[in-house]
Amino acid sequence: MATLHINEERCKGCGFCVMSCPKKALSLAARPNTAGYYPAQCDDEKCIKCGICYTVCPDIVFTITED
Ligand code: SF4
Ligand code: SF4
């Protein structure tokens, strides 16, 4: 099974991934990271591990691993 990992500290809260997710699994968190950006968060129940967020993110926030 694949797992989507989010490195919140790398996120700049641009929202590209939120707009691109075909399952509407992503949103921006209510609490900022240490740089002051509101990082992407994922609803794992909706995520299908398609990798689109990994592709569009300019800051290499996402990784997907196979367990
Ligand atoms: S892997 Fe696909 S479904 Fe999951 S959060 Fe990223 S874009 Fe959305
Ligand atoms: S595309 Fe990357 S930097 Fe932009 S909100 Fe999503 S995770 Fe954060």
Image (cartoon, rainbow, N blue to C red):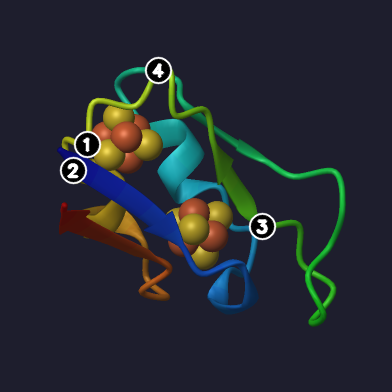
**Mark number for residue 2?**
2
Mark 1 CB lies closer than 8 A to ligand 1:
yes
- Residue placed most toward the observer, 58 or 11: 11
Q: Using a 10 Å C-alpha cutoff, classify the residue at mark 1 as few (fewer than 14 neighbours), some (14 to 19) or many (20 or more).
A: some
Q: Position of residue 67 (x, y in %)?
A: 16, 52
- Residue identifier under label 1: 49
- Between the residue at mark 2 and the residue at mark 3, the CA separation in whole angstroms equals 21 Å
**Mark number for residue 46?**
4
Q: Residue at x 59, y 44 (%)?
A: 41
* Vertical position of residue 13 compared to residue 3: above or below: below
Mark before the other along the chain sequence, 3 or 1: 3
**Numbered disc in front, either 4 or 2:** 2
- Residue identifier under label 3: 39
Residues at circles 2 and 3 in contact by the CB criterion of under 8 Å: no
Residues at circles 4 and 2 in contact by the CB criterion of under 8 Å: no
- What amino acid is labelled 2 in the image? Ala
Mark 3 CB lies closer than 8 A to ligand 2:
yes
Mark before the other along the chain sequence, 2 or 3: 2
